[in-house]
Amino acid sequence: MSTPSEKYQENLDYLSEYARDDWVPIHNVFVSASNTIGAGASLEEITDFAGTMLRDLFQRGVLLGDLTEHGSGFQPWNGTQDEWLTRVRDDVKARQDIPEPGELAWMHIP
């Protein structure tokens, strides 16, 4: 059985590898965060934990962006990583829910 720390690292490894091969909906980070912290977590707790996961994913080269019909098919967001996190938090707060698959942002390691 994995410890919480091992499970967290496994989730980061999985999301990083996935982002290297494909475009990953940011929804997946929120689902992973929710599953890691457990049932009964508030939206704010899930969002905070997802933010921690995103920071760790950024250190692994993951970018947030949008899918496009030109070029590589992925356009990273403008701004800093802190601005990206603010944008994500603001969106979740406005919608009062986590993003659905394909909404808000995609993750990718170009």
Image (cartoon, rainbow, N blue to C red):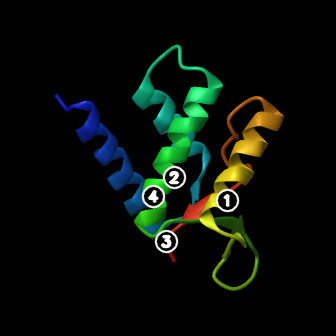
Q: Residue at x 69, y 60 (%)?
A: 83
Q: Along the polypeptide, which appears first: circle 2 or circle 3?
A: 2
- Does dot 3 land on a helix, a strand or a loop? loop
For the residue carrying disc 2, how many other residues have a C-alpha within 10 Å: few (<14), some (14-19), or many (20+)?
many
Q: Nearer the viewer, mark 2 or mark 3?
A: 2
- Whole-number angstrom distance, CA of label 3 to CA of label 4: 10 Å
- Does dot 1 land on a helix, a strand or a loop? helix
Q: Which mark is residue 109?
A: 3
The x, y position of residue 52, in whole percent, is 49, 46
Q: Residue at x 40, y 30 (%)?
A: 36
For the residue carrying disc 1, how many other residues have a C-alpha within 10 Å: few (<14), some (14-19), or many (20+)?
some
Do the CB atoms of the residues marked 3 and 4 lie less than 8 Å apart?
Answer: no
Q: Which mark is residue 54?
A: 2
Do the CB atoms of the residues marked 1 and 4 lie less than 8 Å apart?
Answer: no
Q: Quadrant of residue 4?
A: top left
* Number of marks: 4
- Whole-number angstrom distance, CA of label 1 to CA of label 3: 15 Å
- Whole-number angstrom distance, CA of label 4 to CA of label 2: 5 Å
